[in-house]
Amino acid sequence: MPGGAKLLALDLDKDNTGPLYRQLYDLLRLMILDGRLPSGSRLPANRVLAQDLSLSRNTVATALQQLLAEGYVETRRGDGTYVASELPDDVLGGPDCHQPDRHAYRTEQADDVARRYGLSRRGQTLAAISRASVGSTTAFAPGPDIDAFPFAVWARLLARFWRRPGSELAISRDAGGYPPLKAAIAAYLGAMRGVRCDPGQIIVVSGAQQAIGLAAQVLLDHDDQAMVEEPGYGGIRGALTAAGLRMALVPVDEEGMDIAAGEARAPMARLACVAPSHQHPLGVVMSLRRRLALIEWARRRQGWILEDDYDSEYRYAGRPLAALQGLDTTGRVIYVGSFSKVLFPALRLGYLVVPPDLVDPFIRARRVLDDHTAMLAQPVLARFIEDGHFAAHVRRMRRLYADRQEALLSAAKAHLSGLLKIDADEAGMHLIASPASGSMGAMDDRSIAQAAAKAGVMVMALSTAYAGKPVRRGLILGYAAHDEDAIAAAARRLGEIMAAAA
């Protein structure tokens, strides 16, 4: 019947020792993903579904609540439960301005590849959510200013270590990383971030995503649940998906991740992934009240907090913010850092700080997964930090990026007034541009990003940072890598594009 709820043929095994709500959740999720329950389909009421399947209403409610928490269904006030218009498995990618058509991949490529080669469901999902590299140096593409990095200094250090490397470098197989680099990182984190650790707790990896994936595989089982920020960084969601975890999307407000909402949506979650010092992409700083509530949640649940501290070096006003890890007295925080945004992206070096009791299992798991991180850059980075070049570079970049944020705000005032509203941020490398009041109505930020790309302006649609239905729309404007002239020219062209579309 048009507009009515679908009749569902579900085969539950009531002799199975697993919980019935989980069986129901799995079957409904599979029907949504393979298209038997298309977007917009109305589901039967809890009472009706419970009667049809001879289940308790609590069992049905628990399964549907899980689907709601993960973004597979949505409720409409007074009108029941519907399959979500945008599914989390389709939009796990991060906020990139050039993203592949994931739906096209599923319909045109995935079925054919799976039929010919037996591609796994996980393989299809990972291919569908893969985030294309921005690959652009034009405004407002994200990233650091590569031209400002002291490559001459780096080259001298590189030559010093590798002209005649000792055996400890050439055949090193330390899964935890180069010891002097671990010591340098620990000293830096203690002095600048309030992280409590010794060098033995540092594990050097090939970037933040590998760190996240390693933590997920060591601490959680396949199909366990993790809370992630919504909107958030697609790289985290991709790493968790690759590790076989399910994600509960937790809203972010002016105090950061809403812990109470997260507990309500995901009562069985054992991992929470947060960027408390500068949330991506909204730039929110998690309040002390929320930080303490999150630590208490981890203690009570015997769960884990993964702290992503991706750009804490770039704070331009106010006092430096200590890391969440420094507040934790229960050993429940895994701290993740990276040098890609501070130095240059191709460096591919990151690190974890793990509680002392977890060092051995992390190292053992690391040996199984990929043995150790390439040694080429590790001694160079260690000396770069020890000799003070790292601190000097960060100080220079703080001044430079603060000036460029001011340039973006000035350019926006001159060319985007009445179209976009942009507020200053005390930290970071990008700003959020929201529709000016009454200017664009329901802003189609993806169409604007596509039109801007054709005109040579790289902006990212804020809605692509949501794995579920976007709550906000806008544009993410990176400024760190672009000088004042490039920023002004890009702002002018963006204003012309938006004015033509209005």
Image (cartoon, rainbow, N blue to C red):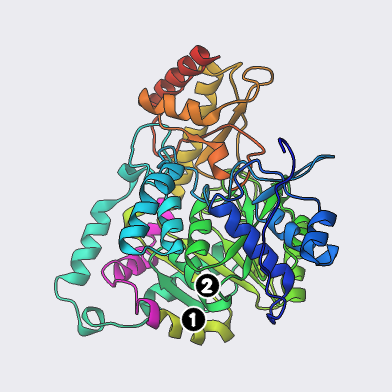
Numbered tag placed on residue 362 in the rendering: 1
Residue 448 point in image, percent of width and height: 49, 25
- Residue 300 x %, y %: 77, 75
Magenta highlight: main SS = helix
Residue 454 versus residue 328 in the image, above or below: above
User: Does 36 sit left or right of 340 as displayed?
Assistant: right
Whether 291 is among the magenta residues is no
Give left or right: position of 409 versus 163. right
Residue at 74% over, 57% down: 64
Q: Are marks 2 and 1 in contact (CB under 8 Å)?
A: yes
Q: Nearer the viewer, residue 494 or 79?
A: 79
The residue at which mark 2 appears reads as 215
* Three-letter amino acid code at the position of disc 1: Phe
Which residue extends farthest left?
Answer: 163
**Is residue 434 in view from this perspective?**
yes
Q: Earlier in the sequence, mark 2 or mark 1?
A: 2
Q: Which mark is residue 311?
A: none
Q: CA distance from mark 2 to mark 1?
A: 8 Å
Amino acid at dot 2 = Ala
- Furthest toward the front, the residue is 1
Q: Residues within 10 Å of mark 2 (few under 14, many from 20)?
A: many
- Closer-to-camera residue (106/145): 106
Q: Which residues make up the magenta segment?
A: 367-393
